[in-house]
Image (cartoon, helix red, strand yellow):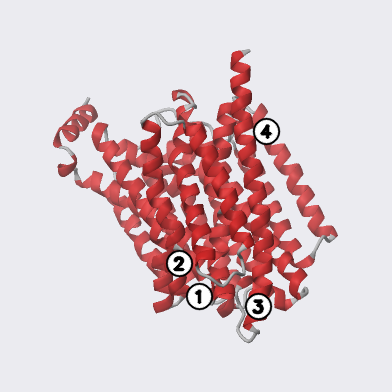
Amino acid sequence: MTISLRRRRTLRTGAGRWTARQWAALVCVLAGYVVGTLTTSGTAIALPTIATELHASPAGMQWFMTGYLLAATCLVLVAGALGDRFGRRLVLRISSVLYTLGMAAAAVAPSIGVLDAARVLAGVGSAGLMACGAAVLASSFDGADRVRAFALCGAAGGIGMAFGPTAAGWIVAETGWRGTFAVLAGVSALMVVSTYLIEESRASQPRRLDVAGAVLLAAGLSLLLLGISSGTTAGPTFVVVGELVGAGLVLAAFVVRCLRAPDPLLDLGLLKDRRIAAWLLASVLGGAGLAGFTVYLPTYLLVVRGVEAGPAGTWMLAFTVPIFVTPVLASRWVTRGGSPARAVALGLGLMAVALLGLAALATHPAPWAVLVPTGLLGVASGILTGLCDAQLMSRAGGEHVGMMSGLLNTVRSGVTSVVMAVFGAGLVVAIARLVGPGATADRIATGDVAGLDPAFAASGFGGGWAAVIGVNAVVIALAGAAFVGLLRARRRSARD
């Protein structure tokens, strides 16, 4: 009864008189949203500089990006279950400390191996931030205050995604790539401090943790990414083939486990509904479909266009500003009677066309050859971002919302890590076919082109970029056709 009365008093006070504990929860989660988006969108700007200074191989740079996502993907559901059982504030505090330590270690990393390990540590912390941040916010606010709090967090994430690359470009230009991680460590330290003011909460009936499922998912994704990165440098050796086959077997065992276990890590039975399968596909594409493009665009701008880190961040506004603006416009259009399915199908088609244009104009000297397709990609991505998640969650049903959220976050993060690895490996292979295999191709792929003929490096990277972006366009087009097919099949079965 005491808790109920306290919450009623909070509701009457309004957003202007939130308690210190509520402000602490909001600051903590806001900082998590900002650093989360900056970690993925902002650090891509520093890739060429990191590769040059640390003499990193393509495989090392792939693990720089995918290691973070791999750790977060494999542990986000585990962290959520631990938070429900032992306390969300406790898990959030430990996760904030791990994230801060990871970013601080990255800022002083002497080698690419240490940097990759620091990123993995930050990914472990990120899993807890993703899993418990929203739960802490939901337990700290009620009614209209909760809506305002989540709206502020959504705006913070959008700002981080939209202006993260630009801010990172300026930081790299002024302080070097280590400054980016130092800033992230400083911001994440605010999360650690704020957790000491947050009220503890836990689930009254915590769900069981599927340890076997978590181990299978982590092992399968690790083997898959290891096989992709090893194949980039060693080719299709016996070991590489074994890693990929092993990954397939382990991930197949994970799927079987999810279908048969009484309390699975992921409820794959939800995908029996074709509408849910269609909207999950679109939601995943909204976050993962352009993962390779966003990560390697700064390297393309450096090698092919001669644009350094600072100006590259400004160039990327052509992509990030539409992502910030388009979701609001798309949502308004749907609320006024527009069809979300048609809007998303249009977005997927636009994405495929823009990627094809970017591939065809990869070595065209005019700035518009990059800015126009990149802007269209931002519009397409914004449509998917603004509509898909809401449509998916609305079809889950109240009793399945938590499981659907976990399914979406896990699948999207896992697919994103795989897309990044495959995109990077394909880029190295495509460049090697143009300039010859060996150290030169590796240097061009990572942006370490000091001492190389600029025209030679631009031709090699531009040709490889065009090939990989073209394949990306075909995959998006096929996925768009699958999205439309799933929805039409559902309608036909409903009529029958």
Ranked by sequence position, the earlier of labels 1 and 4 is 4
Q: Are marks 3 and 2 in contact (CB under 8 Å)?
A: no
Q: Are marks 1 and 3 in contact (CB under 8 Å)?
A: no
Q: Are marks 1 and 2 in contact (CB under 8 Å)?
A: yes
Q: Quadrant of residue 233?
A: bottom right
Give the alpha-carbon distance from disc 1 to disc 2, as whole Å. Answer: 9 Å
Assign a secondary structure to mark 3: helix
Residue 283: give x, y in percent of width and height. Answer: 53, 40
Question: In the rendered picture of this protein, how many numbered marks are placed on residues?
Answer: 4
Ranked by sequence position, the earlier of labels 3 and 2 is 2
Identify the image quadrant of the N terminus.
top left
The residue beneath circle 2 is: 315
Q: Amino acid at mark 2?
A: Trp
Identify the image quadrant of the C terminus.
top right
Give the alpha-carbon distance from disc 4 to disc 3, as whole Å. Answer: 48 Å
The residue beneath circle 1 is: 307
Q: Is residue 420 left or right of residue 149?
A: right
Give the alpha-carbon distance from disc 4 to disc 2, as whole Å. Answer: 46 Å
The residue beneath circle 4 is: 257
Q: Is residue 180 left or right of residue 214?
A: left
Label 1 crowd (10 A; few <14 / some 14-19 / many >=20): some
Ranked by sequence position, the earlier of labels 1 and 3 is 1
Label 2 crowd (10 A; few <14 / some 14-19 / many >=20): many
Assign a secondary structure to mark 2: helix
Give the alpha-carbon distance from disc 1 to disc 4, as whole Å. Answer: 48 Å
The answer to which of 413 and 474 lies nearer the viewer is 474
Assign a secondary structure to mark 4: helix
